[in-house]
Amino acid sequence: MLETADRLEKLPAAQAAYRAGKLSDLQVEDLSSAAELSPEDEQELLDAVHCKALEDFKRLCARVRAAA
């Protein structure tokens, strides 16, 4: 979780959503690892986290990481 906290320092929208309780630990871990590599996708990932099942969201994050 320390790595996730470090990544969130660079992702203000994700950090705000996590602190507001809008993201679970699993969601923020996947989101931050992808958005760290592709910060321009941070908002798209934040939007997707509430529309997709966890496994679908994990696949989206994996695609973002692979494309970075």
Image (tube, rainbow, N blue to C red):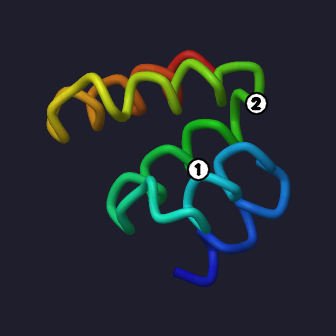
> Which badge, 1 or 2, is on the more N-terminal residue?
1
**Label 1 SS:** helix
User: Residue at position x 28%, y 37% from top?
Assistant: 58
Q: Is residue 26 left or right of residue 53?
A: right
Q: Position of residue 57 (x, y in %)?
A: 29, 31
Closer to the camera in the image, 50 or 26 = 50
User: Residue at position x 42%, y 55% from top?
Assistant: 23
- Give amino acid for label 2: Pro
Quadrant including the C terminus: top right
Which residue matches tag 2?
Answer: 39
Q: Position of residue 38 (x, y in %)?
A: 70, 27
User: Residue at position x 48%, y 24% from top?
Assistant: 47
User: Residue at position x 84%, y 53% from top?
Assistant: 10
Residue 54 in the image: above or below residue 32: above
Q: Position of residue 19 (x, y in %)?
A: 61, 68
Residues at marks 1 and 2 touching, judged by CB atoms closer than 8 Å: no
Which residue matches tag 1?
Answer: 32
How far is mark 1 from mark 2, CA to CA?
9 Å
Q: Is residue 34 left or right of residue 38?
A: left
Q: Position of residue 40 (x, y in %)?
A: 76, 20
**Label 2 SS:** helix
Closer to the camera in the image, 43 or 35 = 43
The residue carrying pointer 2 sits among few (fewer than 14), some (14 to 19) or many (20 or more) residues within 10 Å by Cα, namely some
Residue 56 placement: quadrant: top left
Q: Is residue 9 left or right of residue 24?
A: right
- Give amino acid for label 1: Ser
Q: Is residue 59 left or right of residue 27?
A: left
Residue 67 in the image: above or below residue 24: above
Residue furthest to the bottom in view is 2
Residue 45 in the image: above or below residue 2: above
